[in-house]
Image (cartoon, rainbow, N blue to C red):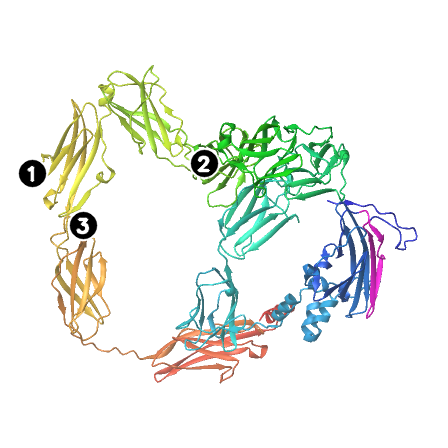
């Protein structure tokens, strides 16, 4: 957070101080600005940036949050002009009275901020003016500008429509019903009224006003209207259904006021009075208002389309970075335009430090420069998924890849100091004997990538000394010494044997060894003396074979020799590993010869490690091993750096920043069940090797927990039966099976009982010695290995115990389906397996209905643990009760199994027609002789017309032996047949019975009678204005004529009266009677046989005040 700059107190007279320096402002805007309709206003603010490290950021705000800079575009125009040391920004704002209010000019630098507020008042109603804000910012150190296109946008109309703040207090006005005022106003005055009374939502105002003006009326075209709203998931189908009065009328379907045309998406159907609209494969565009229109009447509804849950298809990766690096958390969702919520450590953040980017279905969270405060677990949420990724940030450490080497140069030669650091963005300074070196024509300093160079041309004696390079921001320094080689001229005789003068203070680590970093340049200057001038020969190889090795004579190329007076230079450009060898220099002249041997050692980054593989895994850990590089680069291996990534991802995560010395590493904090890959880098004093080959994918998986509840189920002389339950915790690796092990009491060597894992939760260990005490344990195994063992608390003695307690445990384990009646169809196979237990082995005996079983008819097989009863093809004779007896000495256990073999029943007997009347016929029959050895569950009755002879089913599953057949055709002959039914199905065909229709003559009854009222009229007293009715009932044949009278006067076609006759119930409805409608009412029924009459008295009384008020309320509702 920038540090606020304190401002000086304003003067006592309250006038704005525009010239005094307060904070960052040199000149502040006035406290109050009055804008007159049609005139411009200029607001000036000046900021001094001479003490700031960079250009300050300026914002113009309205109120607390509205940034005018973000609203540039159609309504706000920014015009900028630049001078040499100032920047002028002209802001033209189109104003209405709603724009009056508080404004703020805010200036922010790296560690300082300042702001100034002022008020703007616009005089005049519904007028417009231009406010010109001119900002003058003085730039003393630098000049930059901002692209105005970044701030383009639209004004917030809800803010523009707010009522203007008036300088003078407003007079109190009486309360006005705004909606009544709008209801009676012309549409052209809506906007004026909305501004006057502070209505900002014009669209909502018009919708509400439209609903107020619509008078509800009774729907005469619809029997059932559409529901008020419908809800459907996106992509599904929805049906809108209503019911109309007229089945032949045509309807029109509308969507948001537009008529819908029939198509594959919109299907309109008409079925009787029902009208339906089907919308197939709904989309978000189908979320709208729908109407069904019949003439001038209509019914409407709303359809809401729900989006399906958005899932995350690409999960978030972990990041391991250093301070200042860029971080991009990327996920991919199932649909474009989906809403994704980001959070860190479960807390949603809204900081401007984070940037969010959307690219189709990809969503990216960007952190430009990571800091230690950004460490944590980052989450991404959708309405149907969640993913997370961990961010680890390490302090940035600067590593020296190449140190500065000491130099020895002669006068007028060039001296070059060079160093290499790990970060190419790091800058630094050079010092000589503690004094900063300044660049000049002779001294140049360069920075290219990770390399920093100090070049001194035409070296002089005063350039000798200690040179130091110090990186900016790091407590680190690199030092080297420059030695000036003085040439002394002594008297030399004309004859002098040649002499080689080697300088051992430079790159030489010993007297005859020179170390060169691969890729660097080697220049070895050797001083030669002798008179006359000796001949210099350079050669590569051992001195023993010097005569067989060709000399190095080239003056051009990568490896060359340059000769000067009294100086021979051996140069290797871009040293390679093949250049490592012994080099010999031989100088000769007529006086003599001199030789010297030098060993050039090339050092390089090591080769990558080999054979990276995972040897073991845990729940969230994995052990990785690798082999050392084949070539260490000529320098000892300092250690290794490891990286990992999820399979399928392209983002590698660093596991360590400090070099790791061992070739075995345990990776931690991984997710169980996720595939990972690893790679390793080797590090020596020269630098970092290339990455190793990626290891095979591995998955962190933990073994299961130990099996539970291990116990002994059974023991014999040589076997022991164990049982247990599955482990409580299995994990992502699943469960492959169990290993059973045993050992004798006192021994420590466990013997594995099963070679392959046992999948069941029980096992019989065989081949055990009789009488020994044996310990047992069970281990669960999966892909991660063996679980902790489940061990028996006490050893088990291997011996079959025969005693009273065991005999009492003998019993037959009869399966559940055999405990009730066992049914099988004729011809099916019967195979019954009945397990039992008992020691010693019991004697098994079968019998049927108390008699021994014939082995030729029923097969019996018995083992140590069960007995089997088998019948290949069941017949009716096999039905009966089978007894199973289990006996040990004088004790026994008994079980009874009832088997019933069934088949289809026979046909019903004696089918006959007992009665015929109208369109009906009554049938009866008797049950079949053969019920198929099971209960008759019902009967199926069919009929057939003798003309077509097509059979139709009349009844199914009829329980009684009789029925009534309806819907027959008079005069036609019919056939009937009946099937009996049991659990096996219907019986065979039964002979049909033929029915011939013989009409029975009958005598028509005389129904004539004189009219007679069965229910008279009743005297009534009603309230004036409320509709009423009087009723009575009459009988008579022929149908009598009905005459209603009031005070002996016939009531004609008066619309006030409604006369109804419903099956002899007579009703006279009187609509809203008055006191003049009171009197005697009579009803007369007349036919050719006579007449009858009833009379009642109707009393109509006036309404009191309460009844009148209630009637007015009901009238408004109607």
Q: Is 9 on the left-hand or right-hand side of 381?
A: right
Residue 62 appears in the picture as rendered: no
Q: Which quadrant is the N terminus positioned in? A: top right
Q: Which mark is in front, 1 or 2?
A: 2
Q: Which residue is mark 2?
A: 700
Q: Where residue 856 is drawn, which disc sits there?
A: 1
Q: Which mark is in front, 3 or 2?
A: 2
Residues marked 3 and 2 touching at CB (< 8 Å):
no
Residue 31 appears in the picture as rendered: yes
- Disc 1 versus disc 2: distance between alpha carbons? 64 Å
Q: Determine which quarter of the picture holds residue 265.
A: bottom left
- Disc 1 versus disc 3: distance between alpha carbons? 30 Å
Q: Is residue 673 above or below residue 174?
A: above
Which span of residues is magenta-colored?
24-51
Residues marked 1 and 2 touching at CB (< 8 Å):
no
Q: Which residue is mark 3?
A: 935
SS for tag 2? loop
Q: Is 785 on the left-hand or right-hand side of 1025?
A: left
Q: Determine which quarter of the picture holds residue 406.
A: top right
Q: Which quadrant is the C terminus positioned in? A: bottom right
SS for tag 1? loop
Label 2: few (<14), some (14–19) or many (≥20) C-alpha neighbours in 10 Å: many
Q: Is residue 848 above or below residue 288?
A: above
Residue 471 vs residue 1045, the one in the foreground: 471
Sequence order check, earlier mark of 3 and 2: 2
Sequence order check, earlier mark of 1 and 2: 2
């Amino acid at each position: 957070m920038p540090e606020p700059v304190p401002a000086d107190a304003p003067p006592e007279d309250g006038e704005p101080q525009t010239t005094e320096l307060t904070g960052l402002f040199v000149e502040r805007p006035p406290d109050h600005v009055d804008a007159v309709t049609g005139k411009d206003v200029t607001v000036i603010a000046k900021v001094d940036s001479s003490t700031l490290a960079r250009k300050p950021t300026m914002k113009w705000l309205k109120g607390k949050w509205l940034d005018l800079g973000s609203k540039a575009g159609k309504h706000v125009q920014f015009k900028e002009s630049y001078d040499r040391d100032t920047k002028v920004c002209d802001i033209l704002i189109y104003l209405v009275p709603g724009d009056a209010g508080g404004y703020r000019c805010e200036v922010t630098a790296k560690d300082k901020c300042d702001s100034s507020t002022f008020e703007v008042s616009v005089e005049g109603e519904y007028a417009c003016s231009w406010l010109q804000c001119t900002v003058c910012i003085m730039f003393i150190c630098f000049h930059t500008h901002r692209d105005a296109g970044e701030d383009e946008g639209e004004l917030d109309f809800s803010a523009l429509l707010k009522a203007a703040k008036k300088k003078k207090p407003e007079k109190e006005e009486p309360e006005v019903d705004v909606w009544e005022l709008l209801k009676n106003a012309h549409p052209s005055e809506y906007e004026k009224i909305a501004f006057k009374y502070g209505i900002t939502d014009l669209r909502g105002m018009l919708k509400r006003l439209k609903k107020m003006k619509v008078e509800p009326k009774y729907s005469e075209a619809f029997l059932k209207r559409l529901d008020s709203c419908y809800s459907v998931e996106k992509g599904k189908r929805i049906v809108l259904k209503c019911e109309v009065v007229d089945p032949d009328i045509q309807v029109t379907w509308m969507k948001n006021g537009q008529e819908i045309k029939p198509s594959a998406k919109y299907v309109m159907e008409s079925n009787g009075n029902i009208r339906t609209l089907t919308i197939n494969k709904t989309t978000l565009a189908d979320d709208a208002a729908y109407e069904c229109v019949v003439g001038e009447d209509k019914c409407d509804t709303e359809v809401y389309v729900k989006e399906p849950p958005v899932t995350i298809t690409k999960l978030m990766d972990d990041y391991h970075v250093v301070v200042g690096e860029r971080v991009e958390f990327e996920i991919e969702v199932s649909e474009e335009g989906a809403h994704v919520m980001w959070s860190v450590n479960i807390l949603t953040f809204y900081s401007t430090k984070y940037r969010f980017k959307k690219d189709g279905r990809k969503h990216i969270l960007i952190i430009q420069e990571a800091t230690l405060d950004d460490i944590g677990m980052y989450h991404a949420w959708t309405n149907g998924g969640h993913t997370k990724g961990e961010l680890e940030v390490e302090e940035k450490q600067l590593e020296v890849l190449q140190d500065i080497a000491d130099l020895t140069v002669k006068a007028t030669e060039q001296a070059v100091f060079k160093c290499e650091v790990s970060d190419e963005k790091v800058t630094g300074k050079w010092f000589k004997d503690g004094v900063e070196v300044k660049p000049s024509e002779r001294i140049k300093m360069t920075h290219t990538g990770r390399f920093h160079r100090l070049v001194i041309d035409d070296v002089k004696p005063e350039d000798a000394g200690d040179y130091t390079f110090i990186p900016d921001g790091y407590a680190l320094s690199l030092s080297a010494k420059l030695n000036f080689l003085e040439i002394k001229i002594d008297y030399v005789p004309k004859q002098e044997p040649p002499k080689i003068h080697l300088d051992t203070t430079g790159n030489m680590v010993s007297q005859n060894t020179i170390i060169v970093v691969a890729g660097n340049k080697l220049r070895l200057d050797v001083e030669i003396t002798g008179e006359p001038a000796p001949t210099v020969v350079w050669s590569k190889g051992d001195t023993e074979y010097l005569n067989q090795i060709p000399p190095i004579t080239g003056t051009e190329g990568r490896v060359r020799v340059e000769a000067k007076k009294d100086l021979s230079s051996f140069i290797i450009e871009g040293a390679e590993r093949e250049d490592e060898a012994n080099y010999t220099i031989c100088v000769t002249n007529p006086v003599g010869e001199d030789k010297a041997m030098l060993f050039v050692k090339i050092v390089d980054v090591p080769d990558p490690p080999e054979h990276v593989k995972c040897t073991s895994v845990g729940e969230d850990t994995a052990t990785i091993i690798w082999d050392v590089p084949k070539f260490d680069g000529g320098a000892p291996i300092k250690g290794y750096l490891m990286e990992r990534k999820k399979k399928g991802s392209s983002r590698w995560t660093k596991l360590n920043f400090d070099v790791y010395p061992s070739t075995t590493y345990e990776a931690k904090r991984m997710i169980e069940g996720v595939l990972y890959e690893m790679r390793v880098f080797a590090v020596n004093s020269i630098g970092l090797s290339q990455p190793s080959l990626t290891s095979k994918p591995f998955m962190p998986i933990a073994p299961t927990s130990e099996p539970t509840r291990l116990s002994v189920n059974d023991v014999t002389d040589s076997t022991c039966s164990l049982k247990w339950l599955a482990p409580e915790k299995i994990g992502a690796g699943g469960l492959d099976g169990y290993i059973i092990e045993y050992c004798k009491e006192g021994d420590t060597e466990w013997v594995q009982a099963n070679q392959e894992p046992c999948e069941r939760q029980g096992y019989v260990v065989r081949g055990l010695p009789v009488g020994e005490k044996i310990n047992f344990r069970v281990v669960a195994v999966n892909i991660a290995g063996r679980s902790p063992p489940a061990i028996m608390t006490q050893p088990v003695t291997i011996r079959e115990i025969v005693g009273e307690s065991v005999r009492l445990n003998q019993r037959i384990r009869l399966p559940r389906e055999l405990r009730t009646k066992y049914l099988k169809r004729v011809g099916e196979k019967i195979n019954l397996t009945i397990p039992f237990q008992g020691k010693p082995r019991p004697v098994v005996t079968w019998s049927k209905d108390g008699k021994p079983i014939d082995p030729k008819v029923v097969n019996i097989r018995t083992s140590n643990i069960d007995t089997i009863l088998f019948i290949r093809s069941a017949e009716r004779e096999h039905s009966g009760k089978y007894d199973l007896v289990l006996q040990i000495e004088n004790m026994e256990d008994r079980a009874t199994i009832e088997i019933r073999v069934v088949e289809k029943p026979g046909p019903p007997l004696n089918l006959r027609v007992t009665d015929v009347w109208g369109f009906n016929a009554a049938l009866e029959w008797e049950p079949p002789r053969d019920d198929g050895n099971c209960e008759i569950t019902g009967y199926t009755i069919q009929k057939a017309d003798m003309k077509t002879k097509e059979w139709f089913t009349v009844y199914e599953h009829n329980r009684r032996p009789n029925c009534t057949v309806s819907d027959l055709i008079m005069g036609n002959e019919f056939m009937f047949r009946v099937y009996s039914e049991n659990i096996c199905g219907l019986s065979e065909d039964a002979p049909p019975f033929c029915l011939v229709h013989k009409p029975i003559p009958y005598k028509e009854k005389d129904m004539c009678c004189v009219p007679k009222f069965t229910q008279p009229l009743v005297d009534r007293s009603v309230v004036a204005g409320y509709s009423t009715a009087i009723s009575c009932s009459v009988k008579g044949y022929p149908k009598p004529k009905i005459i209603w009278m009031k005070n002996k006067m016939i009531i004609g076609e008066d619309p006030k009266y409604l006369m109804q006759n419903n099956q002899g119930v007579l009703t006279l409805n009187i609509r809203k009677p008055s006191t003049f409608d009171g009197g005697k009412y009579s009803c007369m029924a007349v036919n050719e046989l006579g007449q009858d009459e009833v009379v009642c008295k109707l009393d109509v009384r006036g309404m009191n005040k309460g009844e009148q008020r209630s009637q007015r309320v009901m009238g408004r509702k109607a």
